[in-house]
Structures are given as C-alpha cells and as structure tokens.
Image (tube, rainbow, N blue to C red):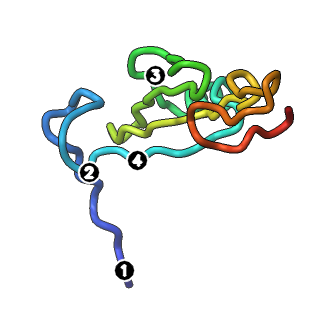
Amino acid sequence: MFHRPKAITPEPKDTPANTLGLRRIMFAVDDIEDVVARLRAHGAELVGEIVQYENIYRLCYVRGPENIVVGLAEQLTITTHCACATGGRPSCGRAPSGC
C-alpha cells in the first residue's frame, strides 16, 4: 500500500513572490477577482495587490496553504488599446480583435 509522504514546505516560509527558483506557477484566468475570491475560500491569501499592467493585463500573486505562490493573469480586451479608428495595427503587433 502506498502512503503519500508528508508535504515539504519551502524555506524560508514567507519567500517574496520574485524569489528565484521554481516556487510559483502562473495561470491565465478570465476573471481575476472571481478566481481570487474562490481561492481565498480555500485558504489562499493575496500577496500584495491586484495590479494592472497598462491596458493589457491584470496580475497578482496568491499564496496557498502549503506556501506555494501562484500567479494569476487576466488579459484585458485588446480593443482598449488597438488602433481601430485609423485601421492600423496596435503597437503590441497583434491584429485588432473586436474593432
């Protein structure tokens, strides 16, 4: 019969989100506020705050009960920064969608 080993916690316990090493993973989500609320219900805590990078992404880190840091990224609608009015391409190089 297999018995799972006890979980190993990373050292130091409260490492900053930008610590080198494989201590975190990032997921793309559709609604970052909803995902954070659902994760908090399971014991996760927000590390810092939800921030917005230009008009492209909303980003945050959450720390789970085993101190694993998970990054969340919500891509904002590209129409907020595309060049619809001029018919040109946005500076990010992606084709305008929804224009």
The answer for how far apart the CA atoms under marks 3 and 4 are is: 15 Å
**Mark 3: which secondary structure?**
strand
Q: Which of 29 and 89 is in front in this view?
A: 89
Upstream in sequence: badge 2 or badge 3: 2
Upstream in sequence: badge 1 or badge 4: 1
Corner quadrant of residue 34: top right
Q: Do the residues labelled 2 and 4 touch (CB within 8 Å)?
A: no
Disc number lying in front (1 or 3): 3
Could you tell me residue 47's position as x and y percent? 39, 22
Q: Are marks 1 and 4 in contact (CB under 8 Å)?
A: no
The answer for how far apart the CA atoms under marks 2 and 3 are is: 19 Å
Label 4: how many Cα within 10 Å (few below 14, some 14–19, many 20+): few
Per the rendering, the mark at residue 2 is: 1
Q: Which residue is drawn at 35% across and 41% down?
A: 68
Could you tell me residue 11's position as x and y percent? 14, 40
Per the rendering, the mark at residue 25 is: 4
In this rendering, the answer to whether 53 lies above or below 88 is: above
Q: In which quarter of the image is the C terminus?
A: top right
* Three-letter amino acid code of the residue under disc 4: Ile
Upstream in sequence: badge 3 or badge 4: 4
Per the rendering, the mark at residue 22 is: 2
Q: Residue furthest right?
A: 98
Which residue matches tag 3?
46
Could you tell me residue 63's position as x and y percent? 40, 32
The answer for how far apart the CA atoms under marks 2 and 4 are is: 8 Å
- Relative horizontal placement of residue 26, taking residue 69 as reference (left or right): right
Label 3: how many Cα within 10 Å (few below 14, some 14–19, many 20+): some
Disc number lying in front (1 or 4): 4
Could you tell me residue 92's position as x and y percent? 56, 35
